[in-house]
Image (tube, rainbow, N blue to C red):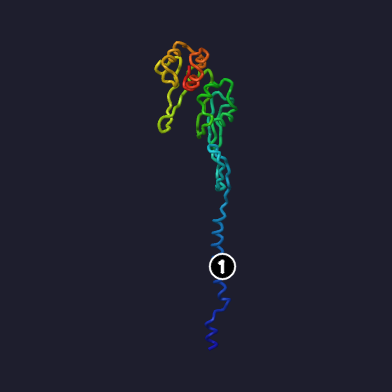
Amino acid sequence: MPEEEASSSVSPLAKAPIVFLVLSVLILIFSFVLGLVQVKEQSIEYTDKTTDEHIIVSQPTQYVEKKVQVDVAGSVKTPGLYDLETGARVMDAIEKAGGLSKNADIRYFERNINRAQVLQDQQKLYIPSTAEVSSGLFAEQRYSLSEGDQVVGSSIISINSASKEDIESLPQIGPATAEKIIIGRPYSDVYELIDKKIVNKGQFEAIRTLISI
């Protein structure tokens, strides 16, 4: 009987290779899982200029910050291609270009250029000069809201050449005032409507952004 018990028992030394193999497999599995968990990331912090919201984004280390490239030309001090952050505004691009030059048409700029507009990649931004505007190369645009808040654009009305019916379509301008505007032609500046006492200040403010010479 003792000899049968001895033959049926397994020596601890014989079990060692099996234990070692199991431990090796477990170590490999643990290392693999740990490697997946410890993926290197970096946090990108920025302020969205559209909403002024502070945003923190976790991205892989190969993340490249997005930029927009804008072509700024015309009456600016340093025309050229400029890289700006996503969410930058028109005024940011103009400042990058050194600001407006001396020959820029300030009135056209204030009436037609939306300095708060968010820039798009590959956008062209052109600032006309006083000579270009006065020669008629740049026609101003007016905008109004229709039903459903859809923006509708139409041509600016020229006080030097528009018909009486077109002038009467302006806010606060009736037949008598439209006739006075026509009689007062030609105009070298829209502000002559005030200087010549053709319209009052209230009427002028209502139509100022809707007219040109």
Residue 60 percent location from the top left of the image: 55, 48
- Number of on-image labels: 1
Q: Amino acid at mark 1?
A: Leu
| Residue depicted at 48% across the width and 14% down the height | 198
Return the residue found at the far right: 98
Residue 164: quarter of image:
top left
Say above or below: 35 vs 180.
below
Residue 134 percent location from the top left of the image: 50, 17
Residue 139 visible (yes or no): no
Between 176 and 57, the one lying in front of the other is 176
Reading the image, the residue beneath label 1 is 23
Say above or below: 66 vs 92.
below
In the rendered structure, the answer to whether residue 147 lies left or right of residue 204 reads left
Tag 1: Cα neighbours inside 10 Å, few (<14), some, or many (≥20)? few
| Residue depicted at 44% across the width and 15% down the height | 177
Residue 21: quarter of image:
bottom right
Element on which disc 1 rests:
helix
In the rendered structure, the answer to whether residue 176 lies left or right of residue 111 reads left
Between 73 and 191, the one lying in front of the other is 191
